[in-house]
Amino acid sequence: VKSKLKDAELLKTDCFVGGEWTGAESGETMPVYNPATNEVVANVPVGGAKETSRAISAAADAFPGWKAKTAKERGSILRKWYDLVVEASDDISSIMTAECGKPFAEAKAECVGGAGSIEWFAEEGRRIQGDVLETVNPSIRFLTTKSPVGVVGAITPWNFPMSMITRKVSPALAAGCTVVLKPAEVTPLTALSLAELGRRAGIPAGVLNIVVGDAPAIGDTLIASDTVRKIGFTGSTGVGKKLAAGAADTVKRVSLELGGNAPFIIFDDADVETAAQMTVSSAFRNAGQTCICANRIFVQEGIRSQFVEAITAVVNGLKLGSGFDEGVTMGPLISPKQRDRVHELVKEAVSKGAKPTTGGGIPNLGGKLDQGYFMQPTVLDNATLDMKVYKEEIFGPAMPIITFKQDKDAIKMANDTEYGLAAYFWTKDLARAFKAAEQLDYGMVGINEQAITSEIAPFGGIKHSGVGRENSKYGLEEFLQLKTLVMGVG
Ligand code: ADP
């Protein structure tokens, strides 16, 4: 990927601790693969407990100085970081496409969104406010102040190698916290390029540290440390629950963005063509690998055949291939394991009676791409509630279509999951829209809209999908703690 970069210095292959680029003490490295071709993009250190402990110390040392800066001073450094990220967005996107496989245009879109969080929190940090409370006794006064929680451990997944980082690191830094970040082991390079730009922007040494490598070793060290006062995690529900349980020992705060099983309801008064387009955009963004992807498509009886036809046509228009190739709209899955898992889910659904109207298997794309981890985008008509694609988060390019008769049937099935991240529905009827929005047990609801992510809107789930919110003014609160001041003036 180096040859594609305008600034080859952005391709960093070390941990970033206390402002220094360093390898693992063991000297061990591990490869980062391009999922479109299975070629090695770079080798990075296998950091573990030792590197993480050093990073925690560096973050703890940097904390008092960073906290003591004014929000305006921190904000102007973040703003500089934002400017550098925007300037370097072609390079960051190339690195991202190389390690995560998403089409270059999608990587650019993530860059815009990811940078948006930096810009937003650069500004929002100046609006941290305490209270002066009306007293109950003339001889005392009550005030509240807000201060940064301290050293933050951030653990991020591979599906959004940039934006999952900026939506944690930017509010943490804006609030005055310092950070030890562990990016996903399969997509560390985007994270490292961000750190290099942060260094150039003037983020002081130790304020942002990155340890790449052995996930459980790094995670366990962050969790066990009493210095780390908060964990921000995006990833699987299983790992999230373990982290939350571990965090109890030192009473750390946690924000968890976990799995989803998003329902996408098309009521019979919806614009079928638009809904079909939007369903595909949602279900197959990043080859279906996002936690808010439409996972179960509920279509009202009267428009079913029209909708299935429309959606099949849209899916047939997708172009699979390397994210660097012109016109490609869908890349590979992140790993052979993920690809095989999705393929198995599709096969199980078909064995139980689902009918693929398009896709269903592993494509032959020819050349180097035959070594990639591709799966055909698949529409599964006649899906039923006993199939795994209904119950589990698919995290790949397959969409089960389920028919419903009455509105209440759709809502009931939509809520029939332990998850509660994002839900979507399509209708032109205002009363129907209000009722559905109120009845859906989800943290986020898209109403005639599938693009629900923005730096200004709170992002997060309920039930087993997580706790806490990222982005928005609520995302900043996650990194602040309240202090009550009671002053005697009698
Ligand atoms: P996904 O299905 O998105 O890969 P994971 O939960 O496995 O979800 O990964 C999300 C992040 O959690 C990644 O950075 C990964 O390395 C990290 N991770 C995985 N296992 C652990 C663990 N035991 N402790 C801490 N972090 C972990």
Image (spheres, rainbow, N blue to C red):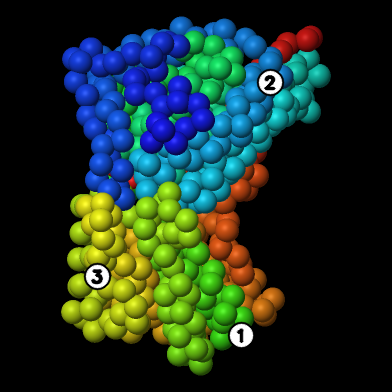
- Residue 326 position in % (x across, y down): 47, 56
Cα gap from disc 1 to disc 3, whole angstroms: 33 Å
Q: Secondary structure at mark 1?
A: loop
Which quarter shows the N terminus? top left
Which quarter shows the C terminus? top right
- Sequence-wise first label, 1 or 2: 2
Q: Looking at the rendering, which quadrant does residue 287 occupy?
A: bottom left
Q: 482 left or right of 205?
A: right
Amino acid at dot 3: Gly
Q: Which residue is mark 2?
A: 76
Q: Which residue is mark 1?
A: 269
Q: Which residue is mark 3?
A: 361
- Residue 153 seen in the figure: no
- Residue 253 position in % (x across, y down): 44, 30
Which residue is painted at 56% across and 63% down in the image? 450
Q: Residues within 10 Å of mark 2 (few under 14, many from 20)?
A: some
- Sequence-wise first label, 1 or 3: 1
Ligand 1 image position (quadrant): top left
Cα gap from disc 3 to disc 2, whole angstroms: 50 Å
Which residue is painted at 44% across and 59% down in the image? 328
Q: Nearer the viewer, residue 66 or 32?
A: 32
Amino acid at dot 2: Ser
- Residue 166 position in % (x across, y down): 52, 34
Q: Nearer the viewer, mark 1 or mark 3?
A: 3
Seen as rendered, the residue at the extreme bottom is: 302
Q: Secondary structure at mark 2?
A: helix
